[in-house]
Amino acid sequence: MPTLIENENNTAAIQPALILIPDISGFTEYMYNSDNIHCRYIIAELLETILDSNQLELSVSELEGDAVLFYKFGKPPSLEEIIAQCNLIFTNFHRYIKQFSFDTLCDCSCCKTAINLSIKFIVHYGKVSPVTVKTHDKLFGSDVILAHRLLKNNIEEPEYILLSDTYLKTQDKSELNKLIDWNKIEKGEMDYKHLGTVQYYYIDVGKLKNKIDVREPSPPVEEGSSKVKFKIYIDTPPDFVRGIITNFKFKVNWITILQNIQFNERTIPRIGGTHKCLMGDMFIKPILIDYQSVYINSERTVYIEKLSIKLITFNIYLSYNIKPKGLGTLLRLELNFAQKGFYPTLLMFFFSRKLSKRKIKTSLSKLKSLCEEVYNKYYLDKKHSSDFG
């Protein structure tokens, strides 16, 4: 049965509605400059963050690649409510980006440039024609078109709340200055084909980013406190070494006793992420160990994993200290035991044996070879090609 769309002049088909569009700025360039799937994961999580911040319980008409079209029929929310809603989305959006940039273990262009993404808001009030297509409500009408057109304006600031004059006519403009104590209100206008000249007011919200804090956890163990220590020089840059260590799919290529690894390839490696490793050879029989990435410092020179052995409810911390030395990297590995008692003492003795140390040193030698081989093959060759191309 075809969908029935009533004439827009039919009052039964037209309803007044608030339209709110949070739009991710820099989206096109961000997606264009990298075909890495991590870009899609990050944008999807940002859109989820926007949806989860919907404290006004607005309905969703459109979910686009870089924007959400919220709406609410009837009397519009107050200025105070709208500004609070936009501020909440803005804060949660940038808190996610800041936390992600701090926590990510990946150095791909998507993960490194996510911090450059920004967000702006269009607030409009007008008449819309709702149409239900299957289970989705879609809005039509010139005011829906205008709300989208308002995204193209002459505002120089990258992050702002734009309030259309039509919306402000439903409010007391004098309330604006009472509500906004952190920036001034600017007035603007744009001429749009078929729609004419549209006046609006806007508020630069960019400076609110400076008020957003993220957690920076302390290292779970003190550097240099372990009695089981190893070091090795690797002839590649520190960032590259860290990238190999934190890329779980490479572990089978350098951890000698690793028989199998399980992790979700549809997630981005970051602090809090987990994977499972089936270890053999050093133990009487293969044993499954839970790994969790628990810490990376702001300089990205110290990375720590927590190993949990469920059979004995015991944790081990692996600390990787990754520092530059000459043109390469001096890697220090420490094993720290989280508890004291019989099992920690037994494992300390176990890892202190010559055989165990030899296997760990063999793993580090394999890591060195892997880093240097991959770096020379894919990075130096690529650089030489560009130099002579």
Image: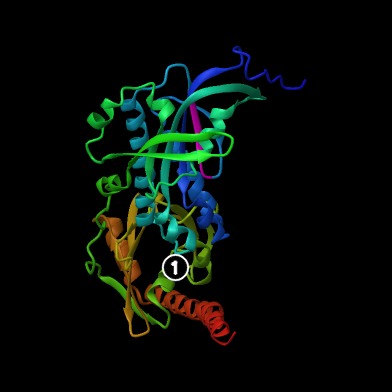
Q: Position of residue 194 (x, y in %)?
A: 59, 35
Q: Is residue 190 above or below residue 251?
A: above
Q: Position of residue 30 (x, y in %)?
A: 50, 56
Report whether 294 appears left or right of 58.
left
Crowding near the residue tagged with mark 1, few <14, some 14–19, many ≥20 C-alpha atoms within 10 Å: some
Pointer 1: what residue?
Answer: 243
Amino acid at pointer 1: Gly
Q: Is residue 250 above or below residue 313?
A: below
Please state which of residues 229 and 310 is positioned toward the viewer in this rendering: 229
- Asked whether residue 255 is drawn in magenta, I would say no
Q: Quadrant of residue 299?
A: bottom left
Magenta region: 66-71
Q: Position of residue 272 (x, y in %)?
A: 39, 51
Outermost residue on the top side: it is: 12
**Quadrant of the snapshot with the N terminus:** top right
The residue lying at 41 percent from left, 60 percent from top is 105
Kindly state the secondary structure of the residue where label 1 is placed.
Answer: helix
Q: Main secondary structure of the magenta part?
A: strand
The residue lying at 28 percent from left, 44 percent from top is 208
Please state which of residues 186 and 16 is positioned toward the viewer in this rendering: 186
Q: Position of residue 235 (x, y in %)?
A: 42, 83
The residue lying at 48 percent from left, 68 percent from top is 257
Report whether 296 appears left or right of 34.
left
**Quadrant of the snapshot with the C terminus:** bottom right
Outermost residue on the bottom side: it is: 388
The residue lying at 56 percent from left, 58 percent from top is 32
The answer to whether residue 291 of the structure is visible from this angle is: no
Q: Quadrant of residue 13?
A: top right
